[in-house]
Image (cartoon, rainbow, N blue to C red):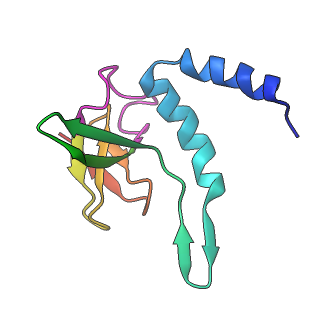
């Protein structure tokens, strides 16, 4: 079990990471919290919520795709923020990433993002 101080130190370390490195850490952590029970699968994901000032009550939500490290020669993709977007061909979830190729965090399918 961890203490509040332990979690505070971890939070400081995480906030020091650039977005693409934070996504890589979350790629390693969040899937461990997936639950499958009675035919229902629940996946903990990282997401973005973009709000247009003209319609502040209707955010555009996108799940953060995990970068395809093989496609990016072991790297994490460009350090440009989460500007690439696509719809997963398999589960039709909107995904976003800093990388041009990634994996849907819900179904694991490869996604090409633009």
For the point 55% across and 20% down, the residue is 15
Name the outermost residue toward the bottom: 38
Q: Residue 46: x percent and y percent?
A: 46, 44
For the point 32% across and 23% down, the residue is 78
Nearer the observer, 15 or 90 = 15
Name the outermost residue toward the right: 1
13 on left or right of 17: right
Nearer the observer, 98 or 2 = 2
Nearer the observer, 81 or 6 = 6
Range drawn in magenta = 66-84
Examine the structure image and report whether residue 57 is included in the region drawn in magenta. no
Name the magenta segment's main secondary structure: loop
Q: Residue 31: x percent and y percent?
A: 59, 53
106 on left or right of 93: right
For the point 32% across and 41% down, the residue is 49
For the point 59% across and 48% down, the residue is 30
Q: Is residue 15 above or below residue 68?
A: above
Q: In this view, does 49 lie above or below 94?
A: above
Q: Residue 60: x percent and y percent?
A: 24, 47
Examine the structure image and report whether residue 83 is included in the region drawn in magenta. yes
């Amino acid at each position: 079990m961890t203490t509040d101080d332990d979690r505070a130190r971890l939070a400081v370390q995480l906030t020091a990471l650039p977005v693409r490195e934070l996504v890589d850490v979350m790629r390693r952590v969040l899937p461990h919290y997936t639950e499958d029970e009675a035919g229902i699968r629940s996946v903990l994901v990282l997401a973005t919520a973009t709000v247009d000032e003209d319609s502040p009550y209707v955010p555009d939500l996108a799940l953060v795709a995990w970068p395809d490290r093989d496609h990016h020669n072991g790297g994490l993709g460009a350090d440009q923020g989460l500007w690439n977007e696509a719809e997963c061909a398999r589960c039709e979830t909107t995904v976003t990433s800093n990388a041009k190729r990634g994996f849907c965090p819900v179904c694991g399918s490869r996604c090409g993002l633009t």
